[in-house]
Image: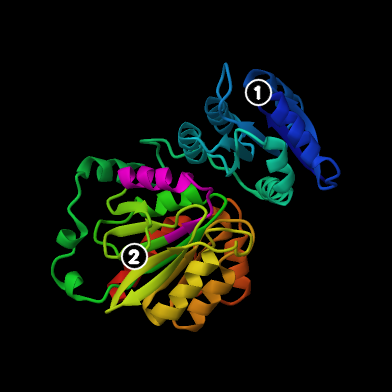
Amino acid sequence: MPVKVYVVDDSAVVRQAIQHLLQGERDIELIGSAPNAMLAAAAIRKRRPDVLLLDIEMPGMDGLTFLRQIMDEDPIPTVICSTLSTSGSQVALEALASGAVAVMAKPRMGLKQFLDESRLEVVQTLKAAATSRPRAGMKPGAAGSGSAAVSASAASAKPRPAPAQAVAGVHALSVNKPVVMGASTGGTQALEAVLTRLPVDCPGIAIVQHMPENFTRMYADRLNNLCAMEVREARSGDRLQRGTVLIAPGGKHMQLTKSMGQYFVKVLDGPPVNRHKPSVDVLFRSAAEVAGKDVMGIILTGMGDDGARGMKLMHDGGARTVAQDEASCVVFGMPMEAIKLGGVDDVRPLSGMADAILRFDARA
């Protein structure tokens, strides 16, 4: 059965371009489109789509409000279609936090050309979204939200002590043993759930989350306001010290390096790997090369197989490797592939990832 897609966008040009893009795709059926949320709501009640492709900047009821309403009433896998403007990126991040499974960036000009050139990526994103299990966003104070209580306490505790102050004593004298993490579809929520459970003196964490350019800095800022640890977008040469989380910039790869017993990150350009830039495999392979058994690797929810081969290399080098379990994944693609390759020591639900990091640190 083809994946049934419904498009909500106030731009007739966008709707026509997407219709043009999906023509001839036997695995995808465009079942309708609407210029606003009110018309879309009536249409999808009559014929429920497998995936919504949703603009977030619309007159009347905006896309973010519509998304939250859908997630509260009857969750439908939703892909956000957003500009790369600052305001568009900020709202798109709010949409991901509210339950959207992916963001598809669109430029303000040359849209038809962009969609034509990005046909494969768009089609794969829609297909992956159709297999996902969307979850409502984490609401402050909601029971069972996982990170709500920790997020509130972390935010209220700021300003934080500098990492060097927070890790006085034995941690300051020990060799830092880093953690590397990779995620894709559903990863923005998953990473928030893990990081908001960690205390300020955790090992340094390097993260690749598949995300377009301009989104990663705002995503890091968002997490920094929620977490006890310091979270920021990575810059080449940044030290991966305790109490610090470094997120790979969108559109760049990130590698782990080592000098004088300390770990750093290197941000670099290059072609996409496994169709992604940043790529989880690039980070994981570098961790296997420079850290050996002193590193922990975690692979979270996401479509495809990026990170699976890199995790196998870490595993074979003696690293501690953990994958998210199927039941808690939005898309059980990347973890499944890593498990199939025999590169995973432990399979855990998302709620157990923070504890796994703390146990790894206790063994250091």
Report which quarter residue 352 is drawn in: bottom left
Kind of residue sitting beneath label 2 = Gly
Kind of residue sitting beneath label 1 = Asp
Label 1 or label 2, whichever lies nearer to me, is 2
Q: Earlier in the sequence, mark 1 or mark 2?
A: 1
Which mark is on residue 10? 1
| Callout 2: SS | loop
Relative image position of residue 273 (x, y in whole percent): 60, 64
Give left or right: position of 121 versus 22: left
The answer to which of 113 and 221 lies nearer the viewer is 113
Q: Is residue 349 above or below residue 140?
A: below
Q: Is residue 101 above or below residue 207?
A: above
CA–CA distance in space, label 1 to label 2: 43 Å
How are the residues colored?
rainbow
The reply to whether callout 1 and callout 2 are in contact (CB within 8 Å) is no
Local crowd size for mark 1, using a 10 Å CA cut-off: few (<14), some (14–19), many (≥20):
some
- The quarter of the rendered structure image containing the C terminus is bottom left
Relative image position of residue 303 (x, y in whole percent): 62, 56
| Callout 1: SS | loop
Can residue 24 be seen in the rendering of this structure? Answer: yes
Residue 216 part of the magenta segment: yes
Relative image position of residue 319 (x, y in whole percent): 43, 78
Relative image position of residue 220 (x, y in whole percent): 39, 48
Q: On the image, numbered disc 2 is attached to which residue?
A: 237
Predominant SS along the magenta part: helix
The answer to which of 104 and 51 lies nearer the viewer is 104
Can residue 320 be seen in the rendering of this structure? Answer: no
Q: Is residue 337 above or below residue 200?
A: below
Residue name at image x 65 percent, y 23 percent: 10
Which residues lie in the magenta part?
207-226
